[in-house]
Image (tube, rainbow, N blue to C red):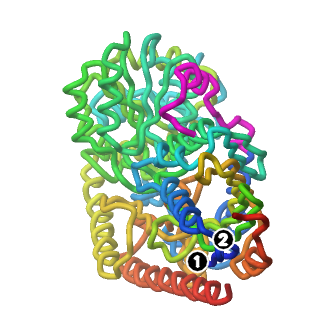
């Protein structure tokens, strides 16, 4: 996976772990559901989740995001869900961290093609000595191509980190 | 968010402010996905001609592996003659509301269908209108409804008419989830209706009839409403379908039959437990009084088809279809195609890793002279894209022998292309 902007940071592994868990907990097998408790542990109590679609913008918190996801699962829009990170860019400003995380959604972990690709824009803050997600935002229809990842990962990225 | 620290008040608030996609949002979203598939040229196509073994699209004659006429009855002289005779006698339209006067062919059809179903029957203009007529009559104050998430869209539409009756959606064919829900609802004042398909039209799998029978034994308030449209004619005694094979004598089960599809005429029929229920639906079900009737040509075809269903000929035709289904299943196994399920039905769904692969396979198959259907969201879940094809009596064994290896090759080609593109993408990044 491409990963730019973390060189020389002391909490690299914490952010790596957070992002790894982030994609693990929203993925689930057929008949199962996202791991809501583990997901909640990743987010600040003040977090917002924003989903942009051609039909409108969903302004959510974790609670309403869960209800939205449960409605999609209930009506059968998804019976399982697998999303993984394929590239990442980080910009740090003190205790503020911005992550542009490119993802792929697949019908199974072993599927050879993706169903959707996109970029999750995450804003993290340092809370009680830990990074917590304050904002998660993505546009379901943003044009995206792996060939264009160069622009995602270009540029240097840390300002005022400890 | 720490869920453990959520206050009781906030949890209550969360329930009150339950997220719901708006009606317009759902329509707009469906329009987006359906438009994409239409632009790809894989749905909403018009045939130039063809109704049986071949279908002509854009001037090309293709072997037809997309038909719902599983028994191929529409080409039989008996049905054509039935339609012609009805036109000669009654014209193209019997110009009365059924609330006042119905075409005499209705009585004949009703009588024949009772013989097929083994119980009282109410004929409706379509299966969708049968649901809209029956469910508001059957479901009473104090009842509760549970619907399978993949039940046919017409059932989901019909239950929306009963907005004051509590409704739960359960995951597809999950009998444990249904059982848990039934336990939870043991104390409801009325009945609990489980609404589902007998055979699911996209994935080609049956409802778990044996388990449903066990649940009926355990839960006295349970009622079943099963849309068995895709099983009629090709399966069961007199072609009455597996739901009636299991539940014809159960007074807590209503089964809906299609007179389209394998029956090859038009309309739907509710097979109900009693004359009293039949009368209530006939007299109070909205579309039974206020919608147009089945018109004479198709009533004539339906009567002819029903006569055929109670004749020894039907069994022979069913055997011919089953030989084709077996041949296809053997070919599928031989070529290692991944199916959505193992049920031996005329509906096959080959699972693919993405809609791109599905569209690619469908296009390649058309280039090779075969017509089959794409199966993508919202017809199936986003994570279950596939290529849907049907095997009917129209298809010869030779057709099937050519179709299956061609499909296996096209799937392999499409997967190979995606694998290569994926490799190129990773290398480029």
- Mark 2 and mark 1 on one chain: yes
Residue A135 picture location, percent across and down: 70, 49
Spot the residue most to the front: A162
Seen in the picture, residue B164 relative to A53 is either above or below; the reply is above
- Along the line of sight, the residue nearer the viewer: A62 or B73: A62
Residue for badge 1? A1
Nearest the viewer among B391 and A47 is A47
Report the side of A60 relative to B15 (left or right). right
Specify whether residue B374 is painted magenta.
no
For the residue carrying disc 1, how many other residues have a C-alpha within 10 Å: few (<14), some (14-19), or many (20+)? few
Using the numbered discs, state the Cα–Cα distance from disc 2 to disc 1 in whole angstroms. 8 Å
Residue A88 got which mark?
A: 2
The quadrant of the image that shows the C terminus of chain B is bottom right
Counting the numbered discs, the total is 2
Chain holding disc 2: A
Snapshot quadrant of residue B341: bottom left
Classify mark 2: helix, strand or loop. Answer: strand
Provide the secondary structure element on which disc 1 rests.
Answer: loop
Q: Which of the 4 image quarters holds residue B211?
A: top left
The picture places residue B359, in percent across and down from the top left corner, at 60, 72
Q: Which residues are magenta?
A: B1-27
Say left or right for B413 vs A147.
Answer: left
Q: Is residue B13 magenta?
A: yes
Q: Is residue B70 visible?
A: yes
State left or right for residue B265 relative to residue A115: left
Is the residue under label 1 in contact with that under label 2 (CB below 8 Å)?
A: yes
Looking at the image, residue B148 lies above or below residue B364: above
**Magenta stretch, overall SS:** helix
Q: Residue at left 75%, top 66%?
A: A91
- Residue B77, image x, y percentages: 45, 57
């Amino acid at each position: 996976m491409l990963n730019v902007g973390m060189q020389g940071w002391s909490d690299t592994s914490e952010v790596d772990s957070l992002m790894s868990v982030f994609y693990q907990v929203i993925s689930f097998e057929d008949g199962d559901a996202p791991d809501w408790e583990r997901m909640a542990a990743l987010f600040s109590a003040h977090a917002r989740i924003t989903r942009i679609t051609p039909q409108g913008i969903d302004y959510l918190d974790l609670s309403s995001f869960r209800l939205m996801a449960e409605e999609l699962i209930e009506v059968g829009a998804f019976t399982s869900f697998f999303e993984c990170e394929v590239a990442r860019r980080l910009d740090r400003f003190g205790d503020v961290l911005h992550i542009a995380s490119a993802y792929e959604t697949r019908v199974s972990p072993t599927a050879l093609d993706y169903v959707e690709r996109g970029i999750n824009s995450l804003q993290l803050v340092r809370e009680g000595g830990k990074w917590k997600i304050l904002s998660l935002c993505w546009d379901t229809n943003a044009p995206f191509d792996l060939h264009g990842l160069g622009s995602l990962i270009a540029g240097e990225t840390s300002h005022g980190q400890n | 968010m720490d869920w453990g620290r959520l206050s009781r008040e906030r949890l209550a608030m969360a329930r009150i402010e339950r997220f719901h996609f708006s009606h317009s949002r759902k329509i707009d979203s469906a329009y987006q996905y359906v438009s994409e598939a239409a632009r790809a040229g894989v749905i909403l196509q018009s045939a130039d001609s063809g109704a049986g073994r071949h279908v002509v699209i854009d001037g090309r004659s293709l072997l037809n592996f997309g038909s719902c006429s599983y028994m191929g009855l529409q080409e039989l002289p008996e049905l054509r003659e039935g339609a012609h005779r009805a036109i000669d006698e009654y014209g193209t339209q019997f110009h009365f509301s059924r609330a006042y006067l119905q075409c005499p062919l209705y009585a004949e059809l009703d009588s024949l269908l009772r013989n097929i179903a083994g119980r009282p029957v109410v004929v409706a203009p379509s299966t969708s209108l049968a649901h809209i007529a029956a469910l508001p009559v059957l479901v009473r104050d104090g009842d509760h409804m549970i619907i399978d998430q993949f039940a046919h869209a017409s059932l989901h539409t019909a239950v929306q008419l009963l907005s004051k009756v509590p409704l739960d959606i359960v995951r597809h064919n999950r009998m444990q989830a249904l059982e848990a829900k039934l336990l939870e609802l043991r104390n409801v004042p009325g009945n609990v209706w489980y609404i589902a398909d007998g055979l699911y039209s996209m994935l080609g799998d049956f409802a778990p009839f044996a388990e449903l029978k066990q649940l009926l034994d355990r839960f006295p308030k349970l009622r079943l409403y099963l849309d068995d449209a895709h099983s009629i004619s090709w399966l069961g005694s007199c072609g009455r379908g597996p739901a009636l094979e299991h539940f014809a004598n159960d007074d807590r089960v209503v089964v809906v039959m299609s007179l389209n599809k394998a029956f090859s005429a038009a309309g739907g029929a509710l097979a109900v437990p009693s004359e009293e229920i039949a009368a209530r639906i006939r007299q109070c079900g909205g579309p039974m009084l206020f919608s147009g009737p089945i018109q004479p040509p198709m009533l004539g075809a339906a009567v002819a088809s029903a006569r055929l269903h109670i004749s020894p000929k039907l069994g022979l035709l069913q055997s011919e279809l089953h030989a084709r289904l077996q041949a296809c299943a053997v070919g599928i196994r031989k070529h290692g195609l991944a199916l959505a399920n193992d049920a031996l039905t005329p509906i096959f769904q080959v699972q693919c890793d993405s809609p791109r692969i599905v569209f690619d396979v469908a296009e390649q198959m058309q280039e090779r002279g075969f017509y089959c259907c794409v199966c993508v969201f919202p017809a199936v879940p986003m994570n279950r894209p596939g290529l849907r094809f049907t095997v009917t009596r129209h298809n010869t064994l030779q057709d099937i022998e050519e179709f299956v290896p061609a499909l296996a090759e096209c799937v392999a080609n499409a997967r190979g292309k995606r694998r290569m593109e994926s490799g190129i993408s990773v290398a480029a990044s």
